[in-house]
Amino acid sequence: MIILKASIHVKRSLAFTFRYTSDFSHIQDWDPGVVSCVAHNPEVVGKGSQYDLVLKFGPFRPKMKYEIIEYEPYSRVVLKGEGDSFSAMDTIIFTKTDKGTQIDYQADIRFAAAGKTIERILSPVMKHVGKKAMAGLEHKLTGNKGLSEKKKCFKSGSSLADYIADHAVFPGMLMFSRFGYEFSKRFWLEPAGTLYRKNIVLTGGTSGIGKAAAFKLAEKKAFLTLIARNRQKAEQVQQKIIQKTGNPHVDILIADLSLMQDIKAISRKIAETKKSIDILINNAGALFNERKMTSEGLEQTFATDLLGVFYLTQRLKDCMAEGGRIINVSSGGMYTQKIDVDDLENKSGEYNGAKAYARAKRGVVILTRLWAERFADKGITVHSMHPGWVDTPGIEKSLPEFHQLVNRMLRTPEQGADTIVWLALSKKGGQCSGLFWLDRRPHETVVFPKTGESERERQLLWENLNNTLSEFK
């Protein structure tokens, strides 16, 4: 048997603390080991109350049923849990103090026919998750907002497996490779349904990841609009998609997305169609090894990979359907860089194309969070994702040494595009917002010290992008 014990103190009244904690339908808000919890009778909490839980243990999603078997208001709650191969007995003691309430929590976990070996292996992992759960409860009860909110999505970086993947350099790098994709896919359930009559606008859909996503979205019967720079190439891809998928609903718009006037023109064309956009996928991007300026006087990495994404999304936001989705394609390279809100055009120091690209992609992830907050009232969800290391013409051209070093580990464009299509199709893509995804799982956005941004820097990024665009509006 594994015994988990923890005690916390919160500056909340005994009655409030008891009511909140004993209602297990809140548990996914503070326990990182729980994906979801549904109460059989959400209106009543007491002895006999039952809950269905989906747990998070690395890539696995075991299910569990909990029942309150003892319920003594303001002093004690005991819950009994049953899973497929394990059981648990959770005892929670509440004690009033001069400054609030003390919570003493003990969980006794038994594995069926597992013996001491599996318990010895899992004990440190489960104790780690248990400590995070109590820290989450303490944080939730100490905070001032959202105590009754029931989140329906994953929590970023919440499981031990995710933590290791995000923070341990070598395992994390392997997860970016095709090996990480193959490992992750073993635990997926394919979302049902199609995207029939869903209007999707996709940038950069004529090569690499974007092209792979375009074919898959067309297979799912979406009504697709591809925004591309090269008309001849776009028309060739358009015909191939129609021929291969049998989906005739594939349109193209021609624009250079590093040019704000082009973005202004195509966004006006889209608005004039009067068709609501169900899904906007900002995939277009490029890594430039030399610092050059666009014809509009903007540094091209900044213009293509950050400002253009911002401007197109802002121009199309009023065209988005209620319940629409925005998917922003970032890069794992953004983990290495911090946004410099005072030098978005990479003027200071020696220009480095990979760093400039990573900073722009960091900016896209920051914008995703800001848009998630601003568009919540409209029911629009916003996601950012990175496709892992993908074998594309862009990578081979821009990072030839890296490509030669790891080419046997690189993913196919189809593997890189998988999470884009999944976010467009799955129910989860319409429930969560503001997260950063890899292989259908949310991950942390900051893993190296000093690469994160402050709230003030987020707001400055927004303001500086708007100020740059003022001459183009």
Image (cartoon, rainbow, N blue to C red):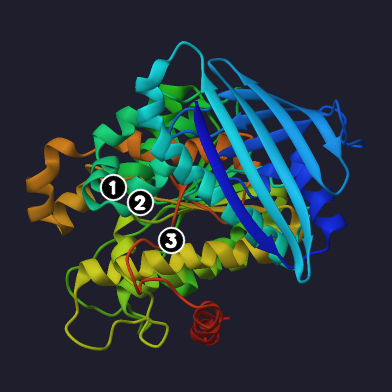
Q: Residue at label 2?
A: 166
Label 1 to label 3: alpha-carbon separation = 36 Å
Q: Secondary structure at mark 1?
A: helix
Residue drawn at the location 41% of the way across and 24% of the way down:
243
Disc 1 + disc 2, Cβ < 8 Å: yes
Q: Is residue 363 left or right of residue 61?
A: left
Residue type at mark 1?
A: Gly
Q: Is residue 189 above or below residue 316?
A: above
Label 1 to label 2: alpha-carbon separation = 6 Å
Label 3 to label 2: alpha-carbon separation = 36 Å
Residue drawn at the location 60% of the way across and 41% of the way down:
429
Which label was assigned to residue 172?
A: 1
**What residue occupies the far top of the structure in this picture?**
113
State which tag comes first along the sequence, 1 or 3.
1
Residue type at mark 2?
A: Asp
Is residue 79 visible in the rendered image? The answer is yes
State which tag comes first along the sequence, 3 or 2.
2
Residue type at mark 3?
A: Ala
Which label was assigned to residue 392?
A: none
Which label was assigned to residue 255?
A: 3
Residue drawn at the location 34% of the way across and 40% of the way down:
416
Percent position (x, y) of residue 376?
A: 71, 59
Q: Secondary structure at mark 2?
A: helix
Q: Is residue 214 above or below residue 284?
A: above
**What residue occupies the far right of the structure in this picture?**
43
Percent position (x, y) of residue 177?
A: 24, 40
Q: Residues within 10 Å of mark 3 (few under 14, many from 20)?
A: many
Percent position (x, y) of residue 128?
A: 45, 45
